[in-house]
Image: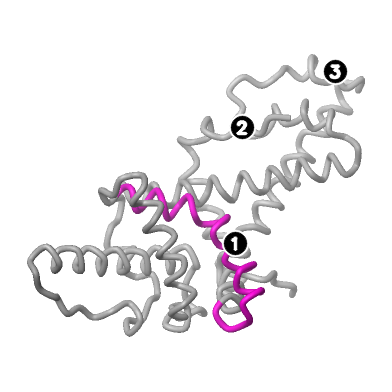
Amino acid sequence: MYFPTTHWSLLAKATLHGETEARSALAELCASYWRPINQFVRSRGFGEAEAEDRTQDFLLHVLEKSVFTRANRLQGKFRSFLLGALVRFLGDALDRRNALKRGGDLQRVSLEVVEVNGELADAFPGSDGVTAFDREWALTILEAALRNLRDEYMAAQREGAFCVLKHFLPGESAPLSYETASAQLGLSLPAFKSEVPRLRRRLRMLVRERVAQTVSAPHEIDDEMAHLQQVLMDKESEFRLPC
């Protein structure tokens, strides 16, 4: 069974290989997880500028310290691992800040010697920070899948068709009627109606491929797909894909 390159593999590549590959891997990790990490940091009381610095520091820390080697990659999702590591990282940062204010130094078990398996993230069920992280994670995946779908239509020289069909994807608050859309594309109503479910199936497949990159084994994909759908239920109006 084919299983795509995951973010676990990407993190291993970034920490174990040469500088050029590490920079490329870091860029991809930043693109995929910058927003979720930044939202969680801001939910912990950091201002916008400091949250950006903390986000950058955390991503560099993960790479420089090979944090992923402490995780059980066979029993965890990358999302949970990253959030657990982030909670510990911010805790260390807060302790250092408080110690400096007191003029002393507080000794703490560091992130590098703690097994990071995402369990700490479960200590905050329903918290605003975890919810913000998960929603940004889900939106980032969905938006990437939508861009891929648009690119496929553009490659097939069907960008105009996509601009009409996209109104029938999740997130459109005022979709066109089938009659109006089919007329715009010059298709019969039955022909157009067959296009819509095909488009939705392709989007779901692209989302699934993205989700597959964030788990350690194929059997975890369905659970993450269900979680993604759940956290997006009240957020569908927040994303748009303009032509």
In the displayed structure, does residue 19 sit left or right of residue 127?
Answer: right
Asked if residue 187 lies in the magenta stretch, the reply is no
Q: Amino acid at mark 1?
A: Ala
Q: Label 2 near label 3: C-beta < 8 Å?
A: no
Q: Nearer the viewer, residue 83 or 28?
A: 28
Q: Is residue 40 above or below residue 182?
A: below
Mark 1 or mark 2: whose residue is earlier in sequence: 1
The tag on residue 240 is 2
Residue 97 image offset from top left, x and y in percent: 19, 63
Check disc 2: other Cα within 10 Å, few if <14, some if 14-19, many if 20+. Answer: some
Tell me how far mark 3 sits from mark 2, CA to CA: 20 Å
In the displayed structure, does residue 212 sit left or right of residue 118?
Answer: right
Q: Label 3 near label 1: C-beta < 8 Å?
A: no
Q: Find numbered disc 1 in the image and state the secondary structure of the residue it sits on.
A: helix
Q: Is residue 64 above or below residue 208?
A: below
For the magenta stretch, what is the residue range? 15-43
> Which residue corresponds to the image point at 68% horizontal and 43% vertical from the top-left?
146
Q: Main secondary structure of the magenta part?
A: helix
| Residue on which disc 1 sits | 27
Q: Nearer the viewer, residue 120 or 68?
A: 68
Q: Is residue 126 above or below residue 71?
A: above
> Which residue corresponds to the image point at 33% horizontal and 48% vertical from the top-left?
42
Q: Nearer the viewer, residue 162 or 48?
A: 48
> Which residue corresponds to the image point at 60% horizontal and 73% vertical from the top-left?
22
In terms of image quadrants, where is residue 222?
A: bottom right
Residue 242 image offset from top left, x and y in percent: 68, 30
Check disc 3: other Cα within 10 Å, few if <14, some if 14-19, many if 20+. Answer: few
In the displayed structure, does residue 184 sit left or right of residue 3?
Answer: right
Asked if residue 17 lies in the magenta stretch, the reply is yes
| Residue on which disc 3 sits | 184
